[in-house]
Amino acid sequence: MFSVVIPLYNKANYVEKSVGSVLGQTFRDFEVIVVDDGSTDEGFNRLKSLQDDRLRLIQQKNAGVSVARNNGVKSAQFDYVAFLDADDWWDERFLEQMAKLITDYPQAALYATNYYSVKNGLNRPAVIGVADGFQRGYIDYFDVYAKTFWAPVNCSYAVIKKTVFWGEKGFQPSLKMGEDLDLWLRVALKHQVGYLNQFLAYSNQDAETSQRALGAEKRWKKEEHVIFNLAYLHEYENQLPKLKYLLDGLRLRSLIPFYLQNAYSEEIREIVKTIDFSRHPFLYRFVYTWPKAVVLGYFLGKKYGSFVKQSMIRMAHKARN
């Protein structure tokens, strides 16, 4: 029933756990396709030692995560494709519960489950913007996402109909940051989204930042970052207030690093002037309108405070163990 696609690039320390969490699923009707995107470490070779007929390994020259996932789906034999990043993992019931969700809510084209954000070895429940008491069913993707700005769908806890995936031409190869958001937006505009409010996936925030799309040192080109490539949605934004609010919130959050480094200043100025700041937290009016020296000082203090807090959490965690 499921083709599980895992893109791999230099995640030797994590990929065996990731693949193992799939092979250990209670639901057995699946295949696993790992697409190595030109890794230079030993991760791909380590997987060769795994003896399981459901596991297929593919290698390609480095072309980016979008191309890797697309190539994985090209090889998929089943009607539903599940994605998992090589440093994340699933609860053993993930596919079992996704199969039930698909059976119970067949009108959806995209399905997802709640998850834990793993930081300093601790599992922090994601705060998804569903209504109190919501357990499972169809959701308004734009509204739910905008409630808390915790992503309700991600490439480590999402399942999509393969026909819909190709109907949208898959992930945009040029995008390396937010390529999944771009696809989910396109799908949610045309199809229903099914959601299960159970914590069945683990998003690993402890992985080396150099191997994560949100790593602190990453400085994406505007052609690679989804936030600069949303013009095709302007017509929909004018018709759908919830989509407009969501995208503006994502713009305000995502553009901060570029803005503070004086990167793409003209483009950012044009984007920001279309946003109604009164609808968003005061922080963003502060960031984009106060002197940058003051704003930089604020973030420096916040970064230092976060470092101290995380250090204390790590010490406490080690003491308990």
Image (tube, rainbow, N blue to C red):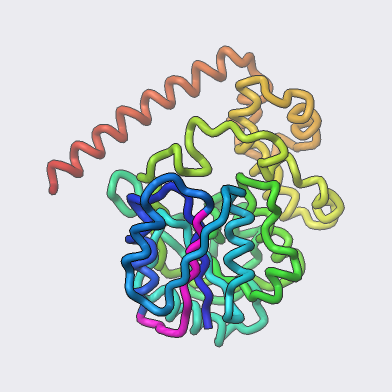
Q: Residue 226, image x and y in percent?
A: 68, 45
Foreground residue, 123 or 287? Answer: 123
Q: Main secondary structure of the magenta part?
A: strand
Q: Is residue 11 above or below residue 89?
A: above
Q: Is residue 108 above or below residue 127?
A: below
Residue at image coords 66%, 41%: 225
Q: Give the quadrant of residue 310.
A: top left
Q: Is residue 296 left or right of residue 186?
A: left
Foreground residue, 158 or 207? Answer: 207
- Residue lying at the far bottom in this picture: please name it: 103
Residue at image coords 57%, 81%: 78
Residue at image coords 36%, 76%: 52
Q: Give the quadrant of residue 95.
A: bottom left
Q: Which region shows up in magenta?
A: 26-36
Q: Residue 54, image x and y in percent?
A: 43, 78
Q: Residue 124, image x and y in percent?
A: 36, 52
Foreground residue, 81 or 149? Answer: 81
Q: Is residue 307 left or right of residue 155?
A: left
